[in-house]
Amino acid sequence: ALEGFRALGERQNSAVTMMNLAAFIVRKGQFEQAQAYYDEALAVFQEMNVRQVEGVCLGNIATLYRRLGRHHDALEVMTKALAISREIGDRSSECVQLTNLSNVYKEEGQVDRGKACAELAISIARELDNRYFETVNLGNLAGYYEGDGLWPQALEFRRESLRISRELGNRLTEAICLGNMGNIFEQQGDLDAAESHVRQSIAITEGEWGVPTGAFRASLAVIRAKKGELDEARALFESAESLLKGAHMPGYLEVLCKKAQIEHEAGHFKDAARALA
């Protein structure tokens, strides 16, 4: 399709095709080629003053930067995409960009800015009756409260997100909510509720979809360790680590912290320290 549009001199269609192609090959790990497609497409959109699609392209570039760990660049590009959304009055796109900004601010530890983005995104999502982005940002907001150790407030947001996910029949966000609620219950010391919620999450992702989930296996490992089932906990952790090892992502780092918890429960303090190092 790309070569055909180029042969016909259809520059905008060529650029849209490049943008779509870049999004596809990113999933295959072809980041440099994806960046080249995005840059070429963006130049066309800017030259032709196609603001709406320019904003979409900038958002995609920012997502690529985030995946590469280039958070400063991601924030800069997302801010430009957000400005375009507001300039052209595209509230749906504004909600998307605020959601993305909230995620990156959280990874950068900029709590107040991230919270503000999530809260504004929730407001816009409700205005547009976009229940999916409402539940996603309720989860984002919960994550900030979890980071501050404010478990009751976080649980309230997770429950609301879970309710909406079930209304929508969105099993992915339901599984994420259940797993994160399990983590909250574990922090509050309610190990039975924690285990129940995490197992429900795993049942959806692994039982229904056949997709192993390392992060929530690690959560279950910690719960089982706290219940004194250390052999089972280690086996769960090893399977979780094998799924995420080498991913160079926050999820893997969280699993290492959970490993330290398991070793600490077993009284293996040196092994716990190595996991945290």
Image (cartoon, helix red, strand yellow):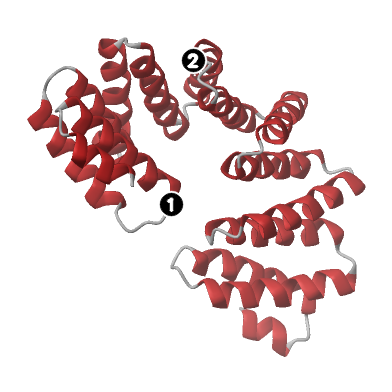
Residue appearing at x 50%, y 69% in the figure: 25
Q: Which residue bears the numbered disc 2?
A: 151
Residue 128 image position (x, y, % from top left): 75, 29
Q: Which residue bears the numbered disc 1?
A: 249
Q: Secondary structure at mark 2?
A: helix
Residue 172 image position (x, y, % from top left): 43, 35
Of residues 97 and 52, the one drawn nearer to the viewer in this rendering: 97
Describe residue 38's horizontal placement relative to residue 172 as left or right: right
Residue appearing at x 37%, y 15% in the figure: 185
Q: Secondary structure at mark 1?
A: loop
Residue pushed farthest left? Answer: 231
Residue pushed farthest bottom? Answer: 7
* Cβ atoms under marks 1 and 2 closer than 8 Å: no
From the viewer's perspective, is residue 52 above or below residue 135?
below
Residue appearing at x 32%, y 11% in the figure: 189
- How many numbered discs, if any? 2
Residue 157 image position (x, y, % from top left): 56, 17
Residue 212: tell me if it is visible: no
Quarter where residue 77 is shown: bottom right
Describe residue 211's horizontal placement relative to residue 18 as left or right: left
Q: What label sits on residue 163 in the rendered view?
A: none
From the viewer's perspective, is residue 37 above or below residue 232?
below
Of residues 210 and 138, the one drawn nearer to the viewer in this rendering: 138
The kind of residue on which mark 2 rests is: Trp
The kind of residue on which mark 1 rests is: Met
Describe residue 268's horizontal placement relative to residue 210 as left or right: left
